[in-house]
Image: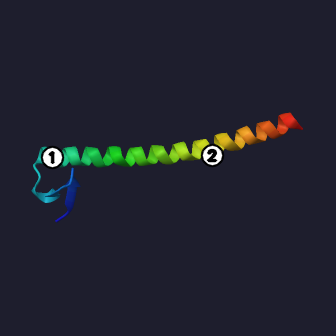
Amino acid sequence: MAKITIDGQEYDSESLSDNAKQQLGSLQFVQSEINRLQALLAVSKTAELAYSTALKKEIES
């Protein structure tokens, strides 16, 4: 019995309707994608800072 919490209310995922289970699956997928994209954004911002620093160093020398 897996429990899920939505807006502070706890539900047993096994007792959900088929449609609700599909919605839950879609929600979990989207949350995973958001986490993946946030990680990609963090990596990209780090690279941007490194390139900016390297460019500034090159221009100043």
Name the kind of residue labelled 1 in the image.
Ala
- Could you say which quadrant of the image residue 12 lies in? bottom left
The Cα atoms of the two marked residues, 1 and 2, are separated by 39 Å
**Residue at (55% x, 46% y) in the render:** 42
Q: Position of residue 22 (x, y in %)?
A: 19, 45
Q: Position of residue 45 (x, y in %)?
A: 60, 42
- Please name which of the two marks, 1 or 2, marks the residue nearer to the observer: 2
Total labels: the figure holds: 2
| Residue that mark 2 sits on | 46
**Residue at (20% x, 54% y) in the render:** 8
Position of the C terminus, as image quadrant, is: top right
Q: Which comes sooner in the sequence, label 1 or label 2?
A: 1
Q: Mark on residue 20?
A: 1
Name the kind of residue labelled 2 in the image.
Thr
Q: Position of residue 24 (x, y in %)?
A: 22, 48
**Residue at (27% x, 45% y) in the render:** 27
Position of the N terminus, as image quadrant, is: bottom left
